[in-house]
Amino acid sequence: MYRKNIPLFCLAYIVGLLIAAGIEQYWLTLLSFTVVAGGLVWKFTPDQWSRLQLRSFLIILLIFLTAFSSFYLRFPTPTNKDISQILTSDKNGMNVTITGKVLNAPTSNRAGKLRFWLATESVKQETKKQGVTGKLYATVPTPL
């Protein structure tokens, strides 16, 4: 019964993911809408629009919404106070002091350095200190 609609179901899932990923990138959203519109026009000529059952349309809509919402459940976005938002790559070479709690016992890696996870609490850059959240994977030289 739904065998002819399987390509539409797959297209709905793919488009749901593309639109969710492209919300902040307008060109990707525009491309997704173009692909959907082209696919629908190609699949359904005017005489075939009447053949699309309401049940099939609801399943397509459900699949689209599932893909759209699962994208945000699988890829969480960091908050403004997350350590990854504050320490960016353009701050390379800048002296920064990070305070927090060590989450596990430090172990040594192949190079002889200590590695551990640090739950960050605050960051001090020059004279500015601010509270942060998140975890860091830290590697420090072994004390002599």
Image (cartoon, rainbow, N blue to C red):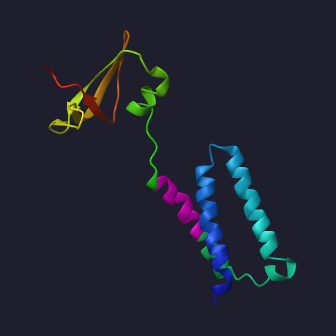
Above or below — where is 22 with respect to 136? below
Question: Was residue 90 drawn as part of the magenta stretch in this picture?
Answer: no
Q: Residue at x 59, y 66 (%)?
A: 13
Above or below — where is 93 with respect to 6? above
Above or below — where is 53 with respect to 92? below
Residue most extreme to the bottom: 1
Above or below — where is 16 with respect to 79? below
Q: Quadrant where the N terminus lies?
A: bottom right
Rendered image quadrant of residue 47: bottom right
Q: Position of residue 80 (x, y in %)?
A: 45, 32
Q: Position of residue 109 (x, y in %)?
A: 22, 37
Q: Left or right? Give the position of 51 relative to 89.
A: right
Q: Residue at x 81, y 72 (%)?
A: 42
Residue most extreme to the top: 127
Question: Was residue 72 drawn as part of the magenta stretch in this picture?
Answer: yes
Q: Residue at x 61, y 64 (%)?
A: 14
Most frequent secondary structure within the magenta stretch = helix
Residue nearer the viewer, 85 or 91: 91
Q: Residue at x 17, y 35 (%)?
A: 106
Q: Which segment did they paint magenta?
A: 63-73
Q: Left or right? Give the position of 116 relative to 4.
A: left
